[in-house]
Image (spheres, rainbow, N blue to C red):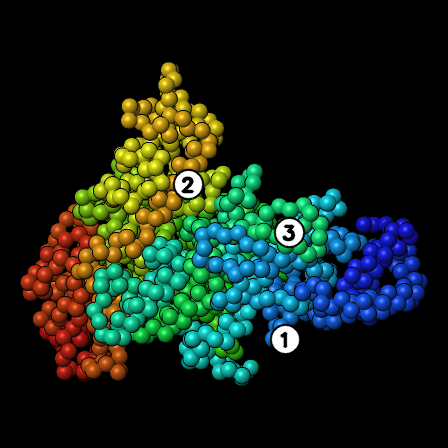
């Protein structure tokens, strides 16, 4: 507001007097609050100064009366109230930060620490919000911006799918300071494991009377999702009672010594990548905790593990797909019938500062990989992966890993700060975003306060107890540099992410860091151009995803490993800080997108699902990755078990049909007809009439064709489906649809409209997601396969030197022709602590093609009588390996050999040629 009349100014003061009278503010606080009123032109400032003394006298008189009256009505006073002295103390602190000589970013970091909701030791709760969208409102009634608190009046059953409860709704005034809004409130209930806390957000009424909600992007607890108010949680109590403090005592800087060097968590030996929603019967962190506790107890008791348990073990790190709150299902019309925190409309209650409301709570059922994030609440955990909806569940899981009986297991968070889904525009202030990209929105990392807030989200997240982070999409952190006139990578921000200090009860650490960075992606030819080393070269202790683990990995095709020979050699000679492997969430999904008419390697199986499972859980590949090559191996749980896998999310109203049309390959590559025929498989699609698997697959492909034909126009697709599948005459625009028009056609298809298309997409997504749960397939695991993998992982852990790059003593080569590809090599390690000073390994792996008799002794000039088999792929019998001078390997088979201990330590310091000569 640029100009204000004398009458308008007086009106502002009258409104403030009424507000302060209601609240019971003291004279000093009222005066200090009016001092903070700012106007944009000097006449108003002069008027304010001229009348300040008289106004203060009036204010004091009113407050004295009010204070006396409030004392008499103490029993009827609201339970929640603003604590004015503490609020102004917080306000003064914020002002002192803004007036300091620190940089804008430095100020932003300090302020970000106290944003959100913090339950204090004295029982008060601090609230802070960054509200730049309100800075244009220079003069406004204090009643237009309030802290809205929802206190449950009945116990919440956090495990109930749905419940309707009474809440007390209070509106508390707040103090604005520049771009920030602050309040210290008494009477707030903080959440605990067995108790719900108060829920909160800011409520703002604009000049046109429209209500706006400002949510907390730094919330600790969002039990009912990103569109619901956040929950106040007693994080201090949670941290104080966690059961792994001894672990942090061993691995962190000494507590209470501020100048002590802060250590970085060392890299693990191997990693298991896990999607929480499909990793246990419950699909929650709670369920995953039960899995690891059971395995830990069995190992401690000396019990043998089942194949379904072996696939989880032998790793010293677990990397979860993102567990930040994801986007939610939203319709363009109304969401009250399905949203997780649905407030029953009540016009009369809406006019009161305190009211009793009925709110329907629904447990989040969101299905997602985890990368579709709105950014808001990234400091919290996705309620869909919490069986209890409590933050304690996260710490329970972390503690179980850290206290694992066979040795501590590290936890790595996969964090997503390179982009936001478009849903973030509904939840966060516009300043968070730079503009649209192929995923949704680019984040505005260059704005100091946004940069500070994102790093603060990460700090709060890792303080749940993580040991490492994997930074998703490092190539996405880009900005236009006006000094150079170019779009550049924001490596400074990526390095800052690596250097966020963890602090748990005074134990401080820097985390182990992995960067996924495929720059110059998405430039054409990026797969071959990318070096995958930019961040490693800048920060040598960090790791990056290597070239063979990215999404263009297609080992189901003939000759794949031969074509990747250049990248294979890069792993061998410079891959010590690369994440290596073959199967992960991206690559297995990429396998679904390959045309069944491609040049498939049918040596791997008789059906497409068999081929895909053996391609991404291939014994020969695992053998050279875990048993021989440099780097840090990572396996994907779903690939190790051989479960179906695809890109499924039930969060789409607008794009759901498009996503499904792009996932039709899932039916070819992941689902056998016998799997579809199971009683518990695909119940939603069967309820729509798709009793026959082939009919479902044919319709899905026809739908994909129709979507492309109409440029993804759902209305036109529905029209075409009705025309082609109904009783209409004429030429069908999509012949594949016309071929489906048979007497046994589901009635659902003959009457398709846009809502039914969306219903089909939702059923496809949710049924497909359910089929990916590993608990469905535990009894079908081949014990020889699971034990082989465990033995390989144990071998790697007992030979940590394998992570290092090749030396001059080591050898690696291939035999390749039109018929087959064989990898073979020799590695050695000079170890003074080793009995004979030299640890040696030989690897031979058949990577594809026809069988071949291999002769490692001739190829490597070794006396094979001095070697023995330590690991052999399933299907290779000891009789087949009786003579190591020559034995047959088939596609996907391989062996690891170790030298037989001998009493000749004098050869340890010889060159390879001299050592080989000494043997012969």
Residue at 35% x, 54% y: name it. Answer: 278
- Mark-to-mark CA distance, 3 and 2: 29 Å
| Above or below 544: residue 616 | above
Compare residues 689 and 453 and report the one nearer the observer: 689
Residue 219 placement, left or right of 288: right
Residue 816 at what x, y percent from top left? 20, 51
Residue at 41% x, 28% y: name it. Answer: 752
The residue singled out by tag 2 in the image is: 762
Residue 232 at what x, y percent from top left? 58, 64
Residue 545 at what x, y percent from top left? 39, 59
Residue at 34% x, 65% y: name it. Answer: 290
Compare residues 433 and 28 and report the one nearer the observer: 28
The residue singled out by tag 3 in the image is: 213
Q: Which type of secondary structure does the marked residue at label 2 adopt? A: helix
Near mark 1 (Cα within 10 A), the count class, few <14, some 14-19 or many ≥20, is few
Residue 766 placement, left or right of 856: right
Quadrant position of residue 243: bottom left
Residue at 52% x, 43% y: name it. Answer: 337
Quarter of the image where the C terminus is located: bottom left
| Above or below 301: residue 812 | above
- Which of marks 1 and 2 precedes in the sequence? 1
Residue 590 placement, left or right of 252: left
Compare residues 419 and 36 and report the one nearer the observer: 36
**Residue 122, numbered label:** 1
């Amino acid at each position: 507001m640029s100009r204000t009349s004398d009458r308008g100014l007086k009106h502002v003061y009258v409104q403030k007097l009424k507000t302060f009278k209601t609240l019971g503010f003291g004279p000093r606080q009222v005066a200090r609050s009016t001092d903070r009123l700012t106007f944009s032109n000097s006449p108003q400032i002069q008027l304010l100064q001229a009348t300040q003394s008289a106004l203060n006298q009036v204010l004091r008189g009113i407050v004295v009366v009010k204070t006396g009256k409030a004392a008499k009505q103490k029993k009827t006073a609201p339970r929640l109230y603003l604590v004015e002295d503490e609020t102004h103390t917080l306000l003064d602190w914020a002002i002192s930060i803004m007036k300091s000589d620190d940089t804008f970013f430095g100020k932003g970091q300090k302020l970000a620490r106290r944003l959100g909701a913090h339950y204090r030791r004295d029982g008060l709760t601090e609230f802070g919000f960054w509200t730049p969208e309100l800075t244009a409102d220079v003069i406004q009634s204090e009643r237009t911006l309030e802290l809205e608190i929802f206190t449950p009046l009945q116990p919440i059953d956090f495990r109930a799918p749905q419940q309707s409860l009474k809440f007390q709704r209070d509106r508390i005034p707040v103090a604005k300071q520049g771009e920030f809004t602050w309040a210290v409130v008494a009477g707030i209930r903080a959440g605990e494991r067995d108790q719900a806390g108060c829920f909160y957000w800011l409520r703002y009424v604009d000049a046109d009377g429209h209500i706006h909600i400002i949510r907390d992007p730094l919330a600790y607890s969002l039990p009912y999702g990103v569109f619901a108010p956040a929950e106040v949680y007693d994080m201090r109590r949670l941290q104080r009672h966690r059961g792994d403090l001894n672990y942090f005592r061993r691995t962190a800087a000494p507590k209470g010594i501020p100048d002590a060097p802060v250590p970085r968590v060392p890299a693990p030996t191997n990693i298991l990548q896990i999607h929480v929603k499909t990793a246990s019967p419950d699909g929650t962190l709670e369920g995953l905790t039960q899995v690891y506790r059971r395995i830990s107890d069995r190992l401690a008791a000396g019990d043998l593990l089942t194949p379904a348990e072996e696939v989880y073990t032998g790793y010293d790190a677990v990397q979860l797909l993102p567990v930040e709150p994801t986007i939610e299902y939203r319709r363009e019309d109304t969401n009250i019938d399905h949203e997780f925190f649905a407030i029953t409309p009540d016009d009369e209650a809406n006019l009161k500062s305190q009211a009793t409301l009925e709110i329907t709570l629904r447990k989040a059922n969101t299905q997602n990989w985890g990368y579709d994030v709105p950014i808001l609440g990234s400091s919290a955990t996705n309620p869909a992966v919490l069986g209890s909806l409590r933050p304690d569940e996260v710490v329970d899981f972390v503690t179980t890993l850290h206290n694992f009986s066979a040795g501590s297991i590290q936890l790595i968070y996969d964090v997503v700060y390179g982009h936001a889904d478009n849903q973030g525009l509904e939840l966060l202030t516009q300043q968070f975003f730079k503009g649209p990209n192929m995923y949704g929105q680019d984040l505005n990392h260059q704005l100091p306060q946004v940069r500070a807030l994102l790093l603060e989200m990460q700090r709060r997240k890792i303080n749940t107890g993580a040991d490492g982070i994997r930074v998703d999409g490092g190539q996405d952190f880009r900005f236009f540099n006006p000094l150079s006139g170019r779009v550049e990578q924001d490596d400074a921000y990526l390095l800052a992410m690596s250097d966020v200090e963890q602090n748990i009860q005074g134990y401080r650490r820097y985390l182990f860091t992995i960067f996924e960075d495929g720059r110059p992606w998405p430039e054409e030819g990026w797969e071959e151009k990318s070096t995958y080393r930019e961040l490693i070269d800048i920060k040598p202790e960090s790791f990056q995803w290597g070239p063979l683990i990215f999404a263009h990995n297609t080992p189901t095709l003939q000759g794949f490993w031969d074509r990747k020979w250049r990248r294979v050699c890069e792993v061998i000679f410079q891959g010590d800080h690369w994440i290596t492997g073959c199967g992960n969430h991206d690559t297995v999904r990429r396998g679904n997108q390959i045309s069944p008419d491609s040049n498939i390697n049918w040596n791997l199986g008789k059906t497409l699902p068999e081929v895909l499972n053996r391609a991404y859980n291939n014994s020969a590949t695992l053998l050279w990755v875990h048993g021989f090559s440099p780097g840090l191996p990572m396996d994907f749980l779903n690939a190790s078990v051989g479960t179906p896998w695809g890109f499924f999310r039930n969060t789409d109203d607008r794009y759901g049909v498009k996503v499904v049309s792009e996932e039709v390959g899932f039916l070819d590559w992941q689902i056998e007809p016998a799997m579809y025929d199971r009683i518990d498989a695909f119940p939603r699609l069967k309820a729509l009439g798709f009793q026959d698997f082939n009919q479902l697959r044919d319709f899905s492909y026809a739908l994909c064709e129709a979507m492309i034909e109409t440029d993804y126009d759902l209305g036109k697709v529905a029209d075409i489906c009705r025309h082609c599948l109904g009783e209409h005459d004429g030429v069908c625009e999509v012949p594949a649809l016309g071929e489906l028009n048979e007497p046994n056609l589901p009635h659902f298809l003959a009457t398709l409209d846009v809502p039914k298309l969306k219903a089909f997409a939702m059923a496809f997504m949710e049924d497909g997601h359910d089929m990916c749960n590993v608990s469905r397939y535990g009894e079908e695991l081949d014990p020889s396969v699971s034990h082989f993998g465990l033995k390989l992982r144990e071998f790697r852990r007992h030979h940590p030197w394998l992570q290092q790059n090749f030396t001059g003593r080591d050898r690696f080569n291939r035999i390749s022709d039109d018929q087959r590809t064989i990898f073979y090599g020799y590695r050695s390690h000079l170890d003074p602590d080793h009995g004979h000073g030299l640890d040696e390994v030989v690897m031979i792996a058949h990577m594809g093609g026809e069988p071949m008799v291999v002769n490692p002794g001739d190829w490597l000039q070794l006396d094979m009588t001095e070697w023995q088999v330590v690991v052999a792929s399933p299907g290779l019998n000891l009789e087949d390996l009786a003579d190591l001078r020559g034995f047959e390997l088939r596609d996907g088979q391989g062996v690891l050999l170790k030298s037989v201990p001998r009493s000749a330590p004098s050869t340890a310091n010889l060159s390879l040629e001299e050592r080989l000569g000494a043997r012969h």
